[in-house]
Amino acid sequence: MTEIKEILKMTQMSKASIEKCASFVPKDKWAWRPSETARSAQQSMGHAATSVQMMTKVLKGEKIDFSGMDHGKIRKAEEKQARTFEEGKELLGRSWKEFEETVNRLSAADLKKTVEMPWGRRTYADIVKDTGWELSYIFAQLQYLQTIWGDLEDHFAM
């Protein structure tokens, strides 16, 4: 298996872990946040999907203006996209499918291309890795929310 295929597989595990963990969120806790600045499970699902969508655009060579991003507006938009677990899972599934298809079309030369991101210059191969890190981070946020309301089970997907 090529390195990028292995990275894609690990990234898919993070996506599956988000879906599994979110499936255990009680309906009455879906939009709950532990503080005004924290994300709810609802926002986390929307954030996962929009993060994958953004990274897909980057891998397709689309220009994204990262300057002046209003994170408050972004969170509100993410929240509206995942009003229920089912909506969030469907949105993440669609986003993932396009991401996976895009990655699978990249050539070895494409993976070496670079793009400037808010956190520095990254190769396209790095962008695939960064997507996995982002999804892993979102999974951890969901796991933390679960512990707050007493669910101490591990909802990791293999």
Image (cartoon, helix red, strand yellow):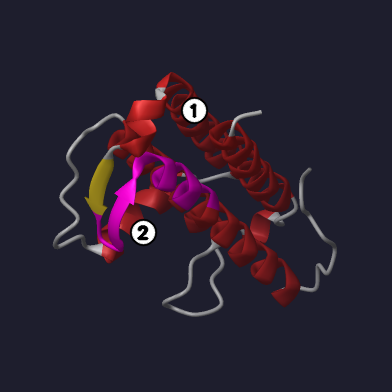
Disc number at residue 75?
A: 2
* Earlier-in-chain disc, 2 versus 1: 2
Q: Is 141 displayed left or right of 91 in the figure? A: right
Q: Which residues are magenta?
A: 117-132
Q: Quadrant of residue 8?
A: top right
Residue type highlighted by circle 1: Arg
Image vertical order of residue 56 relative to residue 107, above or below: below
57 vs 49, nearest the viewer: 57
In reply to whether residue 157 is colored magenta, the answer given is no
How far across and how far down the image is residue 109, in percent? 34, 28
Q: How many marks?
A: 2
Residue type highlighted by circle 2: Arg
Going 28% across and 37% down the picture, which residue do you hit?
Answer: 113
In reply to whether residue 125 is colored magenta, the answer given is yes
8 vs 89, nearest the viewer: 8
How far across and how far down the image is residue 83, in percent? 50, 46
Image vertical order of residue 58 relative to residue 34, above or below: above
Q: Is 86 displayed left or right of 55 in the figure? A: right
Going 40% across and 45% down the picture, which residue do you hit?
Answer: 127
